[in-house]
Image (cartoon, rainbow, N blue to C red):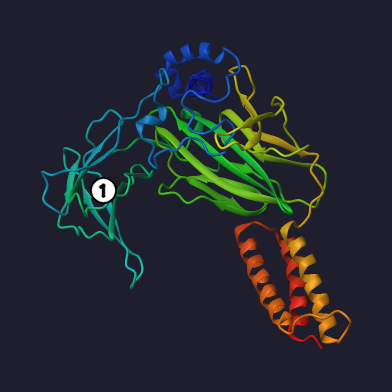
């Protein structure tokens, strides 16, 4: 999707949110309706026009951990959050951090506690952390002095304002010696309907051995002047999901696993753009078709489902157009289906995804390994018993070494996700049996 069309779709959703009459959308963005005309032009052309990644690629544009103003750049009528700043300040003495705390209108925030987090990295002692705190003065200003400028020490300025968490990007004082930080804070609410939150969801599915791995990249756009803290906002996952893993982030925004149910959003989503990524798996028993449902974040304006293209496999999403075959810049092929919501469309709170006409599964490389190992085992058997099939005397030693290497490779494959638990158990059991025969062939 072109950047222009993405912004237009987000603005359309913002307009629809504003019709409630109580949100800051209605008060702040009357000009946003101009974007509706853009969104009404119909489906966008694939590729080009500034998209950092090919259409359908699961990750979306990168964003700052604390959502700078660029997150809303170019969206008509939307609040443009002022820019946070971390920059060297040669006017300060070495080992100093100067902090200015401002509100959404870039006015000073006085008498608010500011924290400087310090991370000390030591190979011998391991990482250690400590914190320093000061209050801003009448001008929303404070200075931390006499700080260490060693290259193994990192600093981060943060503020817990109205129960929210607002932080600058981490930095070191090693080369710059002193830094000036301008950090903005915003009123915080847990009431979703009083905010201007719009979401974009990119869902990637991939068949891996005896599982389907799903990766979700959720972009949360806060188009208003108020920071949002999710309160009980959950996204359901299939009851059989396993291997939940949320991508680590420098910010406090993310998701937590609810065992057997799904994921719960947490953190402070200040005005701007934030990306939350996580992945999970569901078992695949070799069925021809796999169908599952997953929950979505609030106020989805754009949703995309993608998976690697393979001969005969079909991808569907209920209410979405037929999947298209697209290619990225490296020549890889993907099946992609995408939907942009319009003001009259009902909100989508979940996706029903189908992966159909799957091939009969197999353990792949490790099946071949087992067949080869079985051949080795037969050779060991005949050598041990003086049968007609003979092998050099060093054959058992070579077989043992090969089997040990395959067991180590199997463990690595399980850890990396290349094979699933079922294939792992089958392959390991066979390899161990063959290893026992190699160690004691008589």
Q: Residues within 10 Å of mark 1 (few under 14, many from 20)?
A: many
Q: Quadrant of residue 42?
A: top right
- The answer to whether 209 appears left or right of 80 in the picture is right
Q: Quadrant of the N terminus?
A: top right
Closer to the camera, 108 or 40?
Answer: 40
- Residue 308: percent from the left, percent from the top? 66, 40
Q: Quadrant of residue 302?
A: top right
Q: Quadrant of the C terminus?
A: bottom right
- Residue 333: percent from the left, percent from the top? 64, 36
Closer to the camera, 345 or 323?
Answer: 323
Q: Which residue occupies the extreme bottom position in the image?
A: 442
**Residue 97 at least partly seen:** no
Is the residue 240 above or below the residue 377 in the image?
Answer: above
Is the residue 170 above or below the residue 38 in the image?
Answer: below
Instruction: Classify mark 1: helix, strand or loop.
Output: strand
Residue that appears at 54% across and 19% down: 16
Q: Which residue is mark 1?
A: 114
Closer to the camera, 131 or 135?
Answer: 131
Is the residue 422 above or below the residue 429 in the image?
Answer: above
Is the residue 387 above or below the residue 142 in the image?
Answer: below
Residue that appears at 47% across and 35% down: 61
- Residue 85: percent from the left, percent from the top? 26, 38
Residue that appears at 61% across and 62% down: 415
Residue that appears at 57% across and 38% down: 58
- The answer to whether 248 appears left or right of 311 in the picture is left
- Residue 248: percent from the left, percent from the top? 47, 51
């Amino acid at each position: 999707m072109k950047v222009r069309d993405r912004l237009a779709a987000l603005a359309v959703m913002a307009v629809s949110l504003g019709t409630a009459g109580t949100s800051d959308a209605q008060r702040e963005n009357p000009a946003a309706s101009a974007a509706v005309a853009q969104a009404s032009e119909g489906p966008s052309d694939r590729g080009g026009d500034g998209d950092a990644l090919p259409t359908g690629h699961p990750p979306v544009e990168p964003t700052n951990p604390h959502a700078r103003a660029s997150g809303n750049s170019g969206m008509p009528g939307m609040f443009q959050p002022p820019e946070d700043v971390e920059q060297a300040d040669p006017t300060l003495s070495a080992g100093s951090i100067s902090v200015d705390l401002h509100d959404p209108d870039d006015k000073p925030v006085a008498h608010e506690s500011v924290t400087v987090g310090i991370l000390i990295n030591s190979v011998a002692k391991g990482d250690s952390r400590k914190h320093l705190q000061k209050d801003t003065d009448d001008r929303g200003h404070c200075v931390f002095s006499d700080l260490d400028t060693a290259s193994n020490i990192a600093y981060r300025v943060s503020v817990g304002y109205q129960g929210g968490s607002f932080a600058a990007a981490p930095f070191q004082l090693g080369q710059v010696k002193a830094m000036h930080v301008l950090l903005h804070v915003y009123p915080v609410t847990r009431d979703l309907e009083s905010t201007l939150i719009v979401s974009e969801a990119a869902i990637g599915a991939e068949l891996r051995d005896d599982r389907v791995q799903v990766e979700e990249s959720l972009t949360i756009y806060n188009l208003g002047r108020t920071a949002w803290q999710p309160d009980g906002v959950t996204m359901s996952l299939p009851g059989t999901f396993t291997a939940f893993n949320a991508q680590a982030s420098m910010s406090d925004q993310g998701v937590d696993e609810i065992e057997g149910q799904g994921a719960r959003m947490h953190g402070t989503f200040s005005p701007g753009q934030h990306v939350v990524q996580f992945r999970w798996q569901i078992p695949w028993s070799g069925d021809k078709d796999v169908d599952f449902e997953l929950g979505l974040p609030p106020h989805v304006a754009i949703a995309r489902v993608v998976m690697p293209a393979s001969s005969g496999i079909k991808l569907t999403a209920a209410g979405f157009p037929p999947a298209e075959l697209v290619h990225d810049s490296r020549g890889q092929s993907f099946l992609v289906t995408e939907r942009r919501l319009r003001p009259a469309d009902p909100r989508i709170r979940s996706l029903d995804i189908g992966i159909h006409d799957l091939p009969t599964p197999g353990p792949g490389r490790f099946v071949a390994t087992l067949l080869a190992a079985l051949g080795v085992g037969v050779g060991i058997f005949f050598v041990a018993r003086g049968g007609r099939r003979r092998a050099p005397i060093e054959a058992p030693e070579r077989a043992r070494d090969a089997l040990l290497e395959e067991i180590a490779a199997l463990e690595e494959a399980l850890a990396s996700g290349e094979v699933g638990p079922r294939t792992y158990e089958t392959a390991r059991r066979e390899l161990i049996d063959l290893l026992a025969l190699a160690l004691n062939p008589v």
